[in-house]
Image: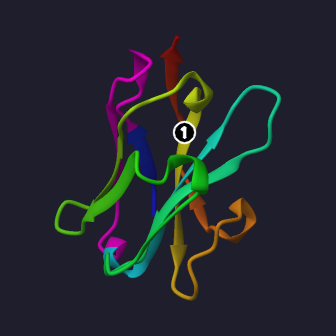
Amino acid sequence: VQLQASGGGLVQAGGSLRLSCAASGRTFSRYHMGWFRQAPGKEREFVAAITWSADDTYYTNSVKGRFIISRDNAKNTVYLQMNSLKPEDTAVYYCAARLGGLVPNTPVDYDYWGPGTQVTVSS
């Protein structure tokens, strides 16, 4: 599966952005999907994930209550709605796919990655 993230940009603190990740292929609905981010000089970190069926979602503590992950399997797309953005949310955001099994929060456990999209939050 090929992934392409979009929707990044520059926003003031307190603002919102919605990231999209479009997937190619007819088996998108079989994949758990995750969002990760990487700030300069830091390791890539888990942000959110959603099961293939959208029955369960997972978030890192720092974004709980502010970010919402969702998916539309008919459109082969996963979304990350980001609200109340903070300067510390500034990073390159990546979407990733994992076929089956548990929903991990570690980058190494995902099978496919797309190029990232830059999110910059100004104070």
Q: How many marks?
A: 1
Asked if residue 60 lies left or right of residue 32, the reply is right
Residue 27 counted in the magenta span? yes
Q: In the rendered image, which quarter is residue 10 located in?
A: top left
Residue 18 on the magenta span: yes
Relative to 89, residue 56 above or below: below
Report the span colored magenta: 6-28
Residue 110 visible: yes
Which residue appears at 39% of the width and 78% of the height? 56
Q: How is the image coloured?
A: rainbow
Q: Nearer the viewer, residue 20 or 61?
A: 61
Question: Which residue is pictured at 79% across the width and 43% down the height?
Answer: 43
> Which residue is at 52% across, 79% downward?
99
The spot of residue 67 in percent (x, y) is 40, 48
Q: Position of residue 95 (x, y in %)?
A: 50, 51
Q: Amino acid at mark 1?
A: Tyr
Residue drawn at (55%, 45%) of the image: 94
- Residue 85 or 53: which is nearer the viewer? 85
Image position of 110 (left or right of 99): right
Residue 14, x across and y down, in percent: 39, 23
User: Where is residue 92, by image quadrant?
Assistant: top right
Read off the residue under disc 1.
93
> On screen, 3 above or below 110?
above
Q: In the displayed image of the protein, which residue is found farthest to the left?
A: 74
* Outermost residue to the bottom: 101
